[in-house]
Image: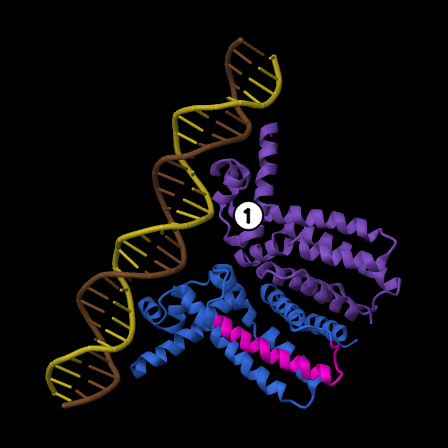
Chain colours: A purple, B blue, C brown, D yellow
Amino acid sequence: MRANAVANRERILAAAEAVFGEHGAAGSTEDVAQRAGVGIATVFRHFPTKSALIEAALIRHFEVLNQQASELAASPDARSALRTLIRTMIETGSTKLTLASLLADGTFPPALRDASDTLRRTVHDVLTRAATAGEIRREVSVDEVYLLVRGLAQACATTPTPRRTLDGAINIVLTGLSH
Amino acid sequence: MRANAVANRERILAAAEAVFGEHGAAGSTEDVAQRAGVGIATVFRHFPTKSALIEAALIRHFEVLNQQASELAASPDARSALRTLIRTMIETGSTKLTLASLLADGTFPPALRDASDTLRRTVHDVLTRAATAGEIRREVSVDEVYLLVRGLAQACATTPTPRRTLDGAINIVLTGLSH
DNA sequence: ACCGTAACGGAGTCTCGCCTCCGGTAGCAA
DNA sequence: TTGCTACCGGAGGCGAGACTCCGTTACGGT
């Protein structure tokens, strides 16, 4: 792949993240192209279909999240690591994209599934560390936390939510986890 | 309005609820017509636009929920009332529709806003009763609970979720509310 | 500097879904 | 029963957005 093409691919992915993050799956490929400063044909040359584009953007998102989660898993303060992780996962809005892709298709393509699983494992680590540190109850499962976090993310994504409210909700969850 | 027309209107609303509940705003008007057993024109005669149709279906949903919530607000056992309410709101999947309409338009038409506000007030009642009964902390706001519930509903709507997991998540929230 | 070719751009095609037009059907009053 | 008319249904119009074709551009190896 030529150097120019690599750069374009990157610009398209960034644009896709922005557009789909803003309008969900309703965002149009032409918007993505325009925001990336390339022609439509270029977008379709790099990603043969709209789903492929969304999928690629999602994978990228998961990877970034996983990167941050890994760093947090290594942090000494398990409790605040958990809090930060939850905040990040919600605010990063990645789930807005997840939602979009889910609505479009319904099933996860394997590559996406991998990225998602990796992230889940890392989150699991953070939870386990918090549990052994006695910060949260031991019976709490990743799935439950995941459900709550994904839910909050989606809720915030669809309706503008004041920071106070979100903080309050997160606090409720954290209290529910620890007691 | 002729008797026949009333029946059709009702059938269309029921069909709309089913279709939009299943596919979100992506559900097509023709699907609704087919499921209702009427022609497309009939749908558009009763509801001048797709948004109007979604709006009507949503209002209906809110009213049903509000009905159930009112009954729960009168229940003697404040704690279990709260639990049941939360469960119902999540399972009824109404929020799937909310989501749909929000994606389509962004702002609430007044009639819908009313229905939504009424429900919110009723939920507020249930919360206050639970608070005075000492079942939950006094500082929790309706908004926070709403956000959590809406989130769980959306999360469950987009991905199939085992009952155990949902129960676990609800438990976490309830513990977070009470302690 | 030159050339082969990877990569680009945008006009055009095609499908799909919202909405309308008009001829047909059937409720309801007399 | 008969007629008036409210109501229905399906075949289009129309616009939007996913995807393709092909002439043009410019990267990069020599």
Query: Where is residue A153 drawn, in percent x and y?
Result: 65, 60
Q: Is residue A2 visible?
A: no
Q: Is residue B1 left or right of residue B119?
A: left
- Looking at the picture, which amino acid does disc 1 mark? Val
Figure check: A68 above or below A141 = above
Figure check: B130 above or below A54 = below
Q: Is residue A175 left or right of residue B24?
A: right
Please give the name of the residue rendered at 77% of the width and 56% of the height, measured from the top-left corner.
A84
Chief SS of the magenta region: helix
The residue pinned by badge 1 equals A19
Q: Quadrant of the N terminus of chain B?
A: bottom left
Q: Is residue A178 magenta?
A: no
> Which residue is nearer to you in this view: A32 or B36?
A32
Q: Mark 1 packing: few (<14 Cα in 10 Å), some, or many (20+)? A: many
Please give the name of the residue rendered at 61% of the width and 28% of the height, measured from the top-left corner.
A3
Q: Is residue B119 magenta?
A: yes
Please give the name of the residue rendered at 73% of the width and 53% of the height, measured from the top-left corner.
A119
Q: Which residues are magenta?
A: B112-138
Query: Where is residue C19 drawn, in percent x and y?
Result: 33, 61
Q: Secondary structure at mark 1?
A: helix
Q: Is residue A20 visible?
A: yes
The chain ID associated with circle 1 is A
> Which residue is nearer to you in this view: D3 or B133?
B133
Query: Where is residue B174 drawn, in percent x and y?
Result: 73, 75
Query: Where is residue A22 drawn, in percent x and y?
Result: 56, 52
Q: Is residue D14 left or right of residue B93?
A: left
Please give the name of the residue rendered at 52% of the width and 36% of the height, measured from the top-left corner.
A37
